[in-house]
Amino acid sequence: MRDQLLKWGVKKSKLIVEGDAVDLDRFQNLPSQAKARAKWNLKTDRLVVGYVGRLTTLGQEKGVATLLQGLALAKGGKKFFGLIVGGPEEDKKKYEKMAVKLGLTEDDVSFAGEIQAADVPSSLTACDVLAMPFPDTPHYRTHMSPLKMFEYMAADRPLLTTDLPTVRDVLDEKTAVFCAPGDAKDFVRALEWIAAHPEDATKRAAAAAALVKRHTWTQRMERILDGVRSKPSA
């Protein structure tokens, strides 16, 4: 994001760029995974792959279709179950219809719809893997700073994400598992890797949870204020 702004002609001496962040207090005293699953009515012994957040941004896809396509490709193995949390309602209905066309049933995926912000941490806790299947478009490649990334990191769950520069600003192979944008087969490959390497995936989740402590809203503001204070006077 910083490099993009510089290309647009914003002078470096005037530039302070910070991404989104997270309130870690919201992730204290979380319920056990079993209680979280009961809350969200998840009755499956499969690996739960979660997507939590708005289903589209500025009218643009956020990769939910890739997630559904991946679940359909992996359906025969009966390994994975999708939990999709978010709205608005018209988008939820669109993806529910897509799931049906792909042959997915209530044994494969659940759509929770829009929820209160206070319920987001427990919905993340109910999952085994958290997915950010962003497509490779100018918005996601160069402009975004996804709030969900920091919330996913705070939830201490393996994070599966498409490989984009805006994600690489924060995450790497020590903290996440990457797949190619818009590629359902590669999404499934990454899921299969997580399922086959639980210890390594757990280590990456723990590293991401440690890293996110540097990305709280308080630390974000402190960095901004430090940047302002350190500017040379005109």
Image (cartoon, rainbow, N blue to C red):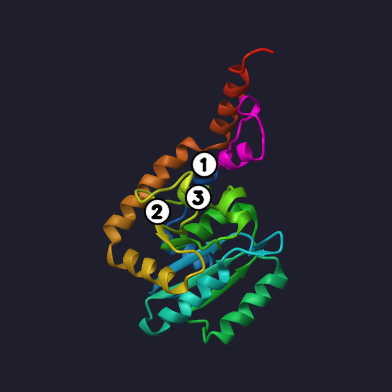
Residue 207 x/y as whole percent: 36, 45
Which picture quadrant has residue 209?
top left
Label 3 – label 2 distance at C-alpha = 14 Å
Of tags 1 and 2, the one toward the viewer is 2
Q: Earlier in the sequence, mark 3 or mark 1?
A: 1
Range of residues picked out in magenta = 1-23
Quadrant where the C terminus is found in the figure: top right
Q: Secondary structure at mark 1?
A: helix
Around disc 3, counting alpha carbons within 10 Å, would you say few (fewer than 14), some (14 to 19), or many (20 or more)? some
Side (left or right) of 162 relative to 91: left
Q: Which residue is mark 2?
A: 176
User: From the viewer's perspective, is 234 left or right of 28?
Assistant: right
The percent position of residue 140, horizontal first and vertical second, equals 59, 55
Residue 200 vs residue 63, the one in the foreground: 63
The correct choice, above or below, for 74 with respect to 31 in the image is below
The amino acid pointed to by label 1 is: Leu
- Which sits earlier in the primary sequence, circle 3 or circle 2? 3
* In this view, 63 is above or below 218: below
Q: CA gap, disc 3 to disc 1?
A: 25 Å
The residue identified by callout 1 is 24
- Mark 3 or 1: in front is 3
Residue at numbered disc 3: 165
Q: Within the image, what quadrant is residue 44 found in?
A: bottom left
Is residue 182 found inside the magenta-colored segment of the image?
Answer: no
Q: Could you tell me if residue 42 is visible in this image? A: no
Three-letter amino acid code at the position of disc 2: Ala
